[in-house]
């Protein structure tokens, strides 16, 4: 389900471009989720080196 608000008619070109990009990214995420859910796509394994040390979270 989309969380985007409606695009106002008075929106400038940059706002329209952001809106279109957001819509494309949202569609891509839905497709990727479907592919993962049907085992056509497997997300990469988590790289533990990217994890923050516990002290960094405080």
Image (tube, rainbow, N blue to C red):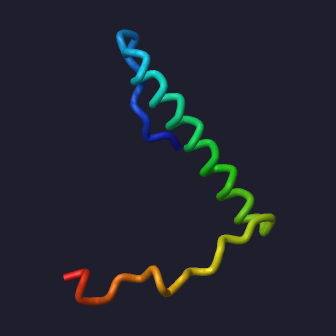
Q: Is residue 3 above or below residue 55?
A: above
Q: Position of residue 54 (x, y in %)?
A: 29, 89
- In the depicted view, which residue is nearer to us: 54 or 3? 54
Residue that extends furthest to the top in the rendered view of this protein: 10
Q: Is residue 22 above or below residue 44?
A: above
- In the depicted view, which residue is nearer to us: 46 or 28? 46
Residue that extends furthest to the front in the rendered view of this protein: 49
- In the depicted view, which residue is nearer to us: 10 or 13? 13
Residue at x 43% of width, y 41% of height: 3
Q: Position of residue 48 (x, y in %)?
A: 50, 87
Q: Position of residue 41 (x, y in %)?
A: 75, 65
Residue at x 40% of width, y 24% of height: 15
**Quadrant of the image occupied by residue 18:** top left
Q: Position of residue 24 (x, y in %)?
A: 59, 37
**Quadrant of the image occupied by residue 9:** top left
Residue that extends furthest to the right in the rendered view of this protein: 40
Question: Where does the C terminus fall, quadrant-wise?
Answer: bottom left
Residue at x 43% of width, y 35% of height: 4
Residue at x 39% of width, y 31% of height: 5
Q: Is residue 50 above or below residue 3?
A: below
Total marks shown come to 0
- Image check: 5 left or right of 43? left
**Quadrant of the image occupied by residue 26:** top right
- Image check: 26 left or right of 44? left
């Amino acid at each position: 389900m989309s969380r985007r608000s409606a695009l106002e008619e008075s929106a400038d070109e940059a706002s329209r471009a952001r809106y279109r990009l957001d819509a494309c990214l949202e569609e891509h995420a839905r497709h990727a989720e479907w592919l993962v859910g049907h085992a056509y796509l497997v997300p990469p394994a988590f790289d533990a080196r990217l994890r923050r040390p516990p002290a960094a979270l405080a």
